[in-house]
Image: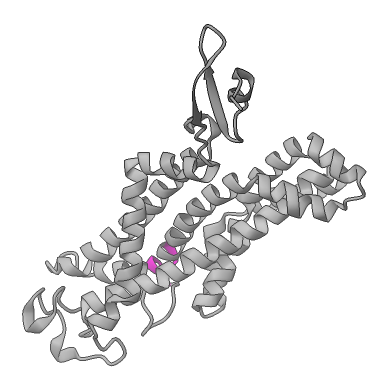
Amino acid sequence: MTDSPNNDAVATPRTETAVSPVGGVANARPRRRTGIGKQGVAVFFENKLAVIGLGLVIALIVFSFIGPLIYQTDQVHTDLSHAYMAPGENGHVLGTDSVGYDQLGRLMLGGQTSLIVGLCAGLLATAFGTIWGAAAGFMGGWVDAAMMRIVDALMSIPALFLFMLIATIITPTVPLLVLVISAFAWLNPARMVRGDSIALRSREFILAMKGMGGTSSRAVRTHIVRNSIGTVIVNATFQVADAVLYVAYLSFLGLGVPPPAANWGGMLSSGLSEVYSGNWWLIAPPGIAIIILVLAFNFVGDGLRDAFEVRLRKR
């Protein structure tokens, strides 16, 4: 039994055929479809600064959490006989500070605090702000007005001033810093997600879901939040960078976690008293570390924004 031209023209799933001018089939080749996730990853890695930022974030995490396992130092007991040693002296790679702590080991310990507070506060603020903004935008009416007036009222309060007030009343700890910073950092994500929620609540799939008996909570959880995931993820990176800066601000003003705990802002504040003593290793390393970490998260955020931007994806 011979195959007819019509049989040849029947393509298998996910293939496309090229028809010759005389009506025959020239060839059939598989249609290549790139998933949205792969497209986003490709766009992200096209952004060189984003790739550099991701590498820096990973390097700082390894430096802060794995470094102390390799380069072990005593960051609890002071030793004034080893104070103000220059880099390389007596085996101290970055020297020592005013009480004899190894500066490189101190930098690793401070990185742990800065990263833990920054990541936890940024992610917690983004999660709460996403839920708040999605619920407000989807409900609309007086519910939206009341919820967003709370946001506006909190945004009118200078966050840094309030952080300083709380830190002077209560002894700062890592969990407290996470809660205090996230308590005000969620405001911007809430406003951003609310805008997406308002645009999505009148879409056909939302109306169809409601017509089938779906609840408002299901709409927010299953549809609104998932369709705003690009905005949420991008904003989370910027929230982490802001949280790191808030920790540095408070510590620089002497309101950070008390010793023997350390963070880069506190190290920078302590080092400023040595600015005229020539002890540059007490100032430069923590300052550079803060700059690198904040820039790295901002670069990653820019790359994620490009990856989730549909118009920048390859077709």
Residue drawn at the location 37% of the way across and 46% of the way down: 50
Direction from residue 210 to residue 254 in the image, left or right: left
Q: In this picture, is 260 found above or below 195? A: below
- Quarter of the figure with the N terminus: top right
Q: Nearer the viewer, residue 259 or 212?
A: 212
Direction from residue 179 to residue 82 in the image, left or right: left
**What's the magenta region?**
249-254
Q: Nearer the viewer, residue 58 or 314?
A: 314
Q: Is residue 197 magenta?
A: no
Residue drawn at the location 31% of the way across and 76% of the way down: 66
Residue drawn at the location 53% of the way across and 54% of the way down: 236
Q: Is residue 250 magenta?
A: yes
Whether residue 150 can be seen here: no
Direction from residue 267 to residue 100 in the image, left or right: left
Number of numbered discs on residues = 0
Q: Nearer the viewer, residue 33 or 184?
A: 33
Q: Report x, y in % for residue 271.
A: 25, 69
Whether residue 193 can be seen here: yes
Q: Report x, y in % for residue 214.
A: 88, 51
Direction from residue 262 to residue 243 in the image, left or right: right
Residue furthest to the top in view is 22
Q: Report x, y in % for residue 258.
A: 42, 81
Quarter-of-image position of residue 261 = bottom left
